[in-house]
Each structure stands twice: as structure tokens, then as C-alpha cells.
């Protein structure tokens, strides 16, 4: 009876261990996700500026799109409704006009707030850090699967935030547009998470503790079984 009880406990602990690991994998992972940011509205406002990609990002002038990769993706509830995705800190967009250079880097998208945060630097000095673009809505394809790390997320029209637009527009002597920022539809964002084969799960610290407890419990149960 004791041996059977020990085996049962061992099985339960193993199941809990597997469940906790699976949950952690669904919560946080790194993947070479494709992030495509449409910026047709911004290129229209700042038509005199030259747009180029920074770091690992590339800018297509023909389509006014910035393509980068979100190197980290987090889904704390296993749902894209709270997806947070970060690019490499050096990835972003450079706008140049005459002697003025504006770099927009450190891109981070938060689906709970439908906002894209960024760091805005003017001629090498940081001028702003925070919400840069904001959308009213976002949609997720029905195939989005947090556990497998696959799916597609697209936002509705994204608009410049007043705080983010102020240093940018002032740098290009377009400060008269600041009062109209809420009317400008800059573009949209598409996040395409690649296949499960490209995803490397990242267990959270609490998972290692649970794994340790589970392994200790399984070892203890096995030792009792052998003793009996």
C-alpha cells in the first residue's frame, strides 16, 4: 500500500512539474518575430526627411514600412491580449533633414495599452522616452497559440502621442502640427510570430524553483518505495 501511495505521489508531482513548465513556456519566450510598422502618415508629414533603418531594422521607402524583429515576447496570461514585445535596443528608425538627425529606437509594443513605446534622440541626445504611437484597436488571428508561439497580431490605425510627437516635430520645424497630432493616422503594426520550431521557451525564475521542489519530491518518493 505504501509503495502504491509513493508511486501515486510521484506521478502527481511529475504531472505538476510538467504543467508548471508548460505554463512558463507559454508565458515567456524569445522568437525571431517579424514586426512590420507602416509609417505612410509620418513620411507624408515629414516629406523633406530621409528615412533609414537602424540596427537590425530596415526601411522600405517605396512602401514606407519599417521591418524589425521583436527579440522578446511575453504573454503573462497566455493570451495575446496582454502581449508585450521588445526589439533590440539599437533597432529603429533614423530621420535626417539637413543638420538634424532624429533616431527612434528601443521599440516596445504593449497590446494591453495598444501602444508602441520608443526612445527619441535628437542629434545624439535623448529627448523623449515613452509612448510614441498608440492605436485604438488590435486584432489577433484565431490561429494565435501562446503555447506554440505562433500567430499574427495587427493593430488598427496608430497615431502619434502628443508627448512623443513634440520633440520629433519641433526638430523638423513642424511644431504647428502638434495641436493636430490626434488626427494623424501614422500607420499600423503587424506582429507575425513564427513557427514553433523557431521558438526557444524561456522558463521564468519561479519555474526553476517549482522544478526543484518537484524533483526533490519525486526522489523522496522513489527512495521510500525502494525502502519498502
Image: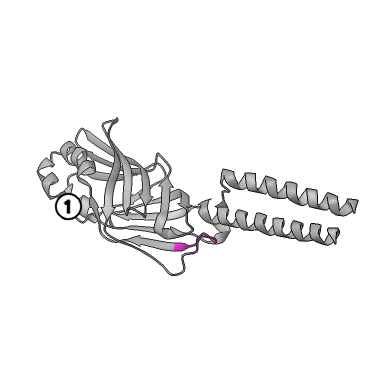
Q: Is residue 88 left or right of residue 128?
A: right
Tell me what residue is drawn at x 35 percent, y 44 percent.
92
The span shown in magenta is 145-151
Q: Position of residue 119 (x, y in %)?
A: 32, 39
Q: Is residue 23 visible?
A: yes
Seen from the viewer's position, the closer of residues 3 and 124 is 3
Say what secondary structure mark 1 lies in: helix
The relative height of residue 86 versus residue 12 in the rendered view (above or below) is above
Q: Position of residue 198 (x, y in %)?
A: 55, 56
Q: Position of residue 49 (x, y in %)?
A: 21, 44
Seen from the viewer's position, the closer of residues 46 and 136 is 136
Q: Is residue 201 a member of the stretch shown in magenta?
A: no
Tell me what residue is drawn at x 75 percent, y 57 percent.
9
* Main secondary structure type of the part rendered in magenta: loop
Tell me what residue is drawn at x 58 percent, y 59 percent.
197
Q: Is residue 16 left or right of residue 87?
A: right
The relative height of residue 140 versus residue 224 in the rendered view (above or below) is below
The relative height of residue 192 versus residue 223 in the rendered view (above or below) is below
Q: Residue furthest left?
A: 176
Q: Quadrant of the N terminus?
A: bottom right
Q: Is residue 30 visible?
A: no
Tell me what residue is drawn at x 74 percent, y 46 percent.
216
Q: Residues within 10 Å of mark 1 (few under 14, many from 20)?
A: some
Q: Which residue is mark 1?
A: 182
Amino acid at each position: 500500500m505504501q509503495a502504491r501511495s509513493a508511486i501515486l505521489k510521484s506521478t502527481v508531482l511529475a504531472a505538476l512539474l510538467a504543467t508548471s513548465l508548460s505554463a512558463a513556456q507559454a508565458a515567456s519566450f524569445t522568437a525571431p518575430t517579424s514586426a512590420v510598422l507602416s509609417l505612410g502618415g509620418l513620411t507624408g508629414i515629414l516629406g523633406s526627411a530621409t528615412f533609414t533603418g537602424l540596427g537590425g531594422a530596415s526601411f522600405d521607402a517605396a512602401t514606407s514600412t519599417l521591418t524589425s524583429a521583436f527579440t522578446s515576447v511575453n504573454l503573462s496570461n497566455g493570451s495575446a491580449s496582454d502581449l508585450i514585445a521588445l526589439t533590440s535596443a539599437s533597432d529603429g528608425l533614423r530621420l535626417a533633414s539637413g543638420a538634424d538627425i532624429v533616431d527612434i529606437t528601443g521599440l516596445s509594443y504593449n497590446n494591453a495599452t495598444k501602444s508602441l513605446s520608443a526612445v527619441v534622440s535628437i542629434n545624439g541626445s535623448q529627448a523623449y522616452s515613452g509612448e510614441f504611437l498608440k492605436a485604438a484597436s488590435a486584432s489577433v488571428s484565431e490561429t494565435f497559440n501562446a503555447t506554440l508561439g505562433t500567430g499574427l497580431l495587427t493593430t488598427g490605425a496608430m497615431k502619434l502621442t502628443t508627448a512623443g510627437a513634440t520633440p520629433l516635430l519641433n526638430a523638423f520645424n513642424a511644431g504647428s502640427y502638434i495641436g493636430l497630432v490626434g488626427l494623424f493616422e501614422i500607420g499600423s503594426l503587424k506582429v507575425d510570430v513564427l513557427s514553433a520550431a523557431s521558438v526557444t521557451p524561456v522558463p521564468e525564475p519561479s519555474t526553476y524553483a517549482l522544478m526543484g521542489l518537484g524533483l526533490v519530491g519525486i526522489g523522496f518518493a522513489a527512495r521510500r518505495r525502494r525502502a519498502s
